Amino acid sequence: MRRLMPAAALTLSLSFAPAFAQTVWEMPTEYPATAIPGEGVASFARLVNERAGGRLTITPSFDAAKGIKSAGMIAAVQEGKVAAGDAFAGALGSVHSLFGLSSLPFLATSIDDAKRLTDLAKPTYAKVFAGYGQRILYTTPWPASGIWSKEVVTSAKDLAGLSIRTYDATSTTVMTNAGAKAVNLSFADAMPKVKDGSVTAVLSSGDGGAGRNLWQFLPHFSEVNYALPISLATVGLAAYEALPADLRQVVDEAAAETERRQWSAIRTRLDENYARMRANGVTIHADLPADLRQRLAVAGKAAVDEWRIKAGPEGAAILDAFAKR
């Protein structure tokens, strides 16, 4: 019996020992699972979870369930509150002006333009993120931003009647200069104000708006093609570098596959969104009056010029390279 006791004790202790070390990364986004950034987070998590053999698990969350909005994502990852996250790049402009690039008005007006601008800027984004102890996982494009409104916007004069939610400092300046009453709000903060009527218009794509059921309150969508902005998914360098080499490869391959998926999905997304919007009673206004487009274009150019100064030589170099079509 004495000779059996140590073996039995060893067997018992091993039965409670894990077969491998397990790492869990929380990965939030402020957008719903049905919005294209939400789909990206879900896709990335699924790929990693399927391929990591249980040694690394990505736990996604949506709708700012963790209380982290895009503008606070860099700090949340840097401070280790979460390992990774997805954030709207325009909102990150409050942390570093270069992140406002993709939401500059009327700069990238097609998917191909948006991809080229993102590719030109990505090395600079990576450099900035490294300064905050983070690594880019993948980028996600948004469909073109338009104006959701309670009342139809049929002329430049109608802008004066809008209390409009904007999504970064630049769009706030543009809409203010165009005559609207603009306020920079995250989607999570904007929706209660849309519901109570204090915000009567929202600058957003049909994607984010469709995901948030804006059609319940704002039944008009003006296709101004303001910008095709991006979201950026990152992971803390410490969390990434703590992984063994084979798991880093799993993460890298899942990130690359997610990025390809996101830029492919965007090409059919507009038609899908418009179909859903029309099915829910939204009137889409594509043929906008010249005075409205002109008012927005003038305000937009001033904002781009202002951003060039704020972003400094690195930002100017990206704009100049993009201009060489």
Image (tube, helix red, strand yellow):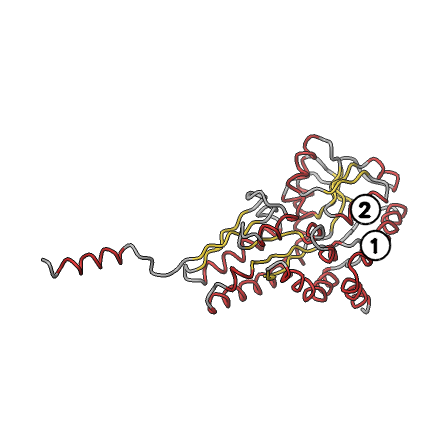
Q: How many residues crowd around disc 1 within 10 Å: few (fewer than 14), some, or many (20 or more)?
A: few
- Name the element at disc 1: helix
Residues 95 and 142: in front is 95
Q: Quadrant of residue 179?
A: top right
Residue at image point 86% right, 44% down: 178
What kind of residue is marked 1? Glu
Residue 160 image offset from top left, x and y in percent: 85, 37
Most distant residue in the top direction: 196
> As drawn, is 51 to the left or to the right of 138?
left
Q: Residue at x 53, y 63 (%)?
A: 254
Q: Is residue 235 above or below residue 66?
A: below
Where is residue 260 drawn, in percent x and y?
Answer: 61, 63
- Mark 2 surroundings: few (<14), some (14-19) or many (≥20) residues within 10 A: many
Where on the picture, by quarter, is residue 147?
top right
2 and 1 marks in contact (CB < 8 Å): yes
How far across and how far down the image is residue 211, in percent?
Answer: 63, 44
Residue 175, x across and y down, in percent: 81, 44
Q: Left or right of 155: which side holds 166?
A: left
Secondary structure found at label 2 = helix
Furthest-left residue in this view: 1
Tell me, for residue 306, which label it has, or none: 1
Amino acid marked by disc 2: Thr
Tag on residue 173?
Answer: 2
Front residue of 37 and 284: 37
Left or right of 5: which side holds 199? Answer: right
Using the numbered discs, state the Cα–Cα distance from disc 2 to disc 1 in whole angstroms. Answer: 10 Å
Residue 199, numbered circle: none
- Who comes first in sequence, dot 2 or dot 1? 2
- Given residues 204 and 9, the one toward you in this image is 9
Quarter of the image with the C terminus in it:
bottom right
143 over 187 or under it: above or below: below
Image quarter where the N terminus lies is bottom left
